[in-house]
Image (cartoon, coloured by chain):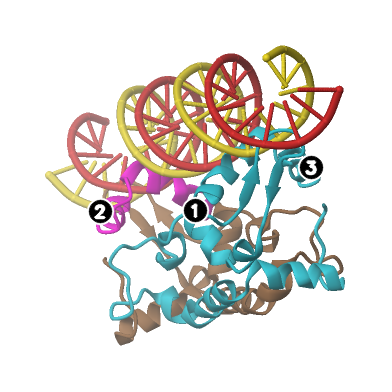
Chain colours: A brown, B cyan, C yellow, D red
Amino acid sequence: MAKDISEPINVPQAYLAKLLQPLVKENIVSSVRGPKGGFYMDDENLEKTVIDIIFVIDSEEKFSSCMLSLDKCNEENPCPLHNILVASRNDIFQQLKEKTIRELAHEVALGNAFLPL
Amino acid sequence: MAKDISEPINVPQAYLAKLLQPLVKENIVSSVRGPKGGFYMDDENLEKTVIDIIFVIDSEEKFSSCMLSLDKCNEENPCPLHNILVASRNDIFQQLKEKTIRELAHEVALGNAFLPL
DNA sequence: TTTTTAAGATGATTTATATCATATATTGAA
DNA sequence: TTCAATATATGATATAAATCATCTTAAAAA
């Protein structure tokens, strides 16, 4: 349930619910209403990645945009920071794109990562 | 002058001036008032790094904080994303900490990077 | 010395984001 | 079939960030 998630991570329940709605709509999270209802992830959901979530909640630009917020900055016309950060940035992007929620959950199950849930 | 910088980067002049004030106060940027006045960077300023700027404008936490915004996440208690991103993140941090403004300006002078100024 | 041009300081306004409130829809259980 | 529990939807409020407006201070030049 939203409450079970919101409390341990210190996010207001109603706000979390609002954030979850577009994820449900985009089939990244599943939900059932009524008593014994709540949010869950089925086999298909678990194959989604962190990037999928970011693209729904924020937007694609959040990641591709210039760190100096220059709209003219791109690969051909890189700003000074672009060159310095492009490698690490692509690395992060790849990681978030490849790692499925299932894999992340597995890390928690193994005790290699922790969540306050 | 603030106007000369603000226009090509599409940031309102008054807002840019407001952002520059703490940088002047922290001796990252220099300024002179009156006619023929404006903002500039002296030899000492040019040795400052991007991290110095970020720490003044935003704050140190902007960089060290957990990507999932979990206050309990740290090196001993890492969230699932922490492990995945820590390497690239440290890499970015190091780059921004080591590169001086002088070096960045040099890249622009060499034509390896571009600014709309 | 006066005027003009710039930064500095401060507060108000706008806009975006986060949060709250309330009503509706769905579903399990009594 | 009714009730209770939970998500869904929508709009209102609060807070933070960005932007605007106005005045003050400093310095160069006439």
Q: Give the magenta range.
A: A1-24
Residue A38 falls in image quadrant: bottom left
- Residue that badge 2 annotates: A7
- Residue that numbered label 3 is attached to: B4
Q: Chain of mark 3?
A: B
| Label 2 SS | loop
Q: Main secondary structure of the magenta part?
A: helix
Task: Identify the residue at image location x=69%, y=69%.
Answer: B102
Along the line of sight, the residue nearer the viewer: B75 or A28 = B75
Q: CA distance from mark 3 to mark 1?
A: 22 Å
Say which quadrant the N terminus of chain A sits in: bottom left
- Amino acid type for the residue under numbered disc 1: Glu
Residue B2, placed above or below residue A58: above
**Mark 1 nearby-residue class (10 Å; few <14, some 14–19, many ≥20):** some
Discs 3/2, front: 3
- In the picture, measured across the screen, residue C7 lies left or right of residue A77, that is left
Q: Position of residue C7 (x, y in %)?
A: 63, 39
